[in-house]
Image (tube, grey):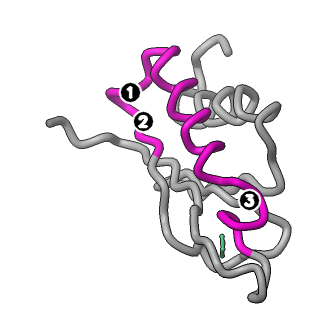
Amino acid sequence: MTKPDNILFVCANARGADKRESCGTSHGSAELCKLLRDEVKARGLKPQLRVTSSGCLGHCYGGPHAVLMPADKWFSGFDADDCSSIIDAVQQTISPNSNV
Ligand code: FES
């Protein structure tokens, strides 16, 4: 297995409905993570980019939240309609000379 150069961490932390806001419970981040993964796979970016769910990234409110590492580029408050443009931005960040 090849180690990816870039990882997009998508917070999937879920707290109970009686707790404070979280990406998983309030914003359905597991499904968003799947959509982002599908987009990466469809574009053939998988060797250089991995999308994975993560625990709390520490921002919580205004989610869901995702962060591209090592670039430290954050995406917040997105929904299913934004997944393609997020991967556009990620692709531009990891391959700035590509024609996205
Ligand atoms: S619950 Fe997602 S950043 Fe904290």
Q: Quadrant of residue 24?
A: bottom right
User: What residue is drawn where x is 68% and y is 26%?
Assistant: 88
How packed is label 1: few (under 14 Cα within 10 Å), some, or many (20 or more)?
some
User: Residue type at mark 3?
Assistant: Pro
Q: Which mark is residue 64?
A: 3
Q: Nearer the viewer, residue 22 or 90?
A: 22
Instruction: Check disc 2 and report the residue beneath it.
Output: 49
Is disc 2 placed on a helix, strand or loop? strand
- Name the quadrant where ligand 1 sits: bottom right
How packed is label 2: few (under 14 Cα within 10 Å), some, or many (20 or more)?
many
How packed is label 3: few (under 14 Cα within 10 Å), some, or many (20 or more)?
many
Picture layout, residue 61 above or below residue 42: below
**Magenta region:** 22-51
- Residue 42 is inside the magenta segment: yes
Tag 1 or tag 3, which sits nearer the N-term? 1
- Say if disc 3 is inside 8 Å of ligand 1: yes
User: What residue is drawn where x is 65% and y is 43%?
Assistant: 32
Tag 2 or tag 3, which sits nearer the N-term? 2
Q: In the picture provided, is 15 more to the left or to the right than 54?
A: right
Query: Which residue lies most toward the front here?
Result: 17
Label 3 and label 2: CA atoms lie apart by 20 Å
